[in-house]
Image (spheres, helix red, strand yellow):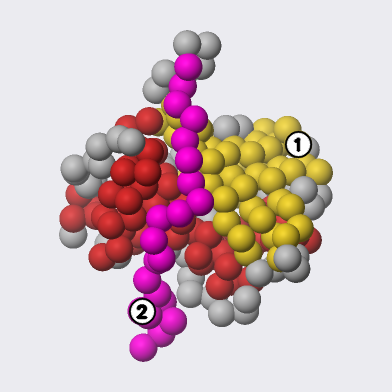
Amino acid sequence: MSDREHYTPGPASGAQVKKGGAEKDQEKWTLILVRELRHPPEKVWQALTDPPQLREWAPFVTDGSLGTVGTVKLTWVGAPMPLETKVTRADAPTVLEYDDTRWELEPSDGGTRLTLWHNIDRRFIAWGAAGWHIAFDVLDRLLAGQPIGRIDGADAMKFDAWQRLVSEYAKQFGIEAPRWAPKAAQD
């Protein structure tokens, strides 16, 4: 059995949401997810910005580095077309911002406290939290030299723990968990 077959996500933790206000888009909420990683900020930064490393853990691919200010094409898993993405801030190894996503890396007990801010349609905020939770687990294993391969989109939804994570995050956020799944997740 592979490490991937033994992988089970832990309980939902380290997440909160900021709900859209009058001056913000009411349909988008900001997911804030914090994870303690056992790896130094420089190593985590590389994994957040380097296209070959992103392919191993992130729910998207890029045609260039996210480590410098400029434009790259970013394609979310399952999306039909790449999006032109503007990296607006790349202060290695502490802050990375592009489109509706912000990453902060802080040294913490010999590792890194990684904080993600990601604007997500409010109807899918619990799904986003569950998806990033799994992506962070995969990232941590990749950085430890024990890669299990990217788990995203419909693949993530096939995990028995997926619905549990969605429900746990929905409860933490004070919302009702989504009751339907895309056809690919039902197969």
Q: Is residue 138 magenta?
A: no
Residue 84, x across and y down, in percent = 60, 34
Q: Determine whether, in the image, residue 165 is placed left or right of residue 24.
A: left
Q: Choose the circle earlier in sequence order: 2 or 1.
A: 2
Work out whether residue 127 or residue 75 is closer to the camera in this orientation and state it: 127
Q: Is disc 2 surrounded by few (<14), some (14 to 19) or many (20+) residues within 10 Å?
A: few
Q: CA distance from mark 2 to mark 1?
A: 37 Å
Residue of label 1: 89
Q: Is disc 1 surrounded by few (<14), some (14 to 19) or many (20+) residues within 10 Å?
A: some
Residue 150, x across and y down, in percent = 47, 64
Q: Is residue 17 magenta?
A: yes
Decide if residue 170 is in sight here: yes
Q: Determine whether, in the image, residue 54 is placed left or right of residue 149.
A: right
Q: Quadrant of the N terminus?
A: bottom left
Question: Magenta residues?
Answer: 1-21
Q: Quadrant of the C terminus?
A: bottom left
The secondary structure that dominates the magenta segment is loop
Q: Is 57 drawn above or below residue 34 in the view shown? A: below
Residue of label 2: 5
On the image, which quarter does residue 110 sit in? bottom right
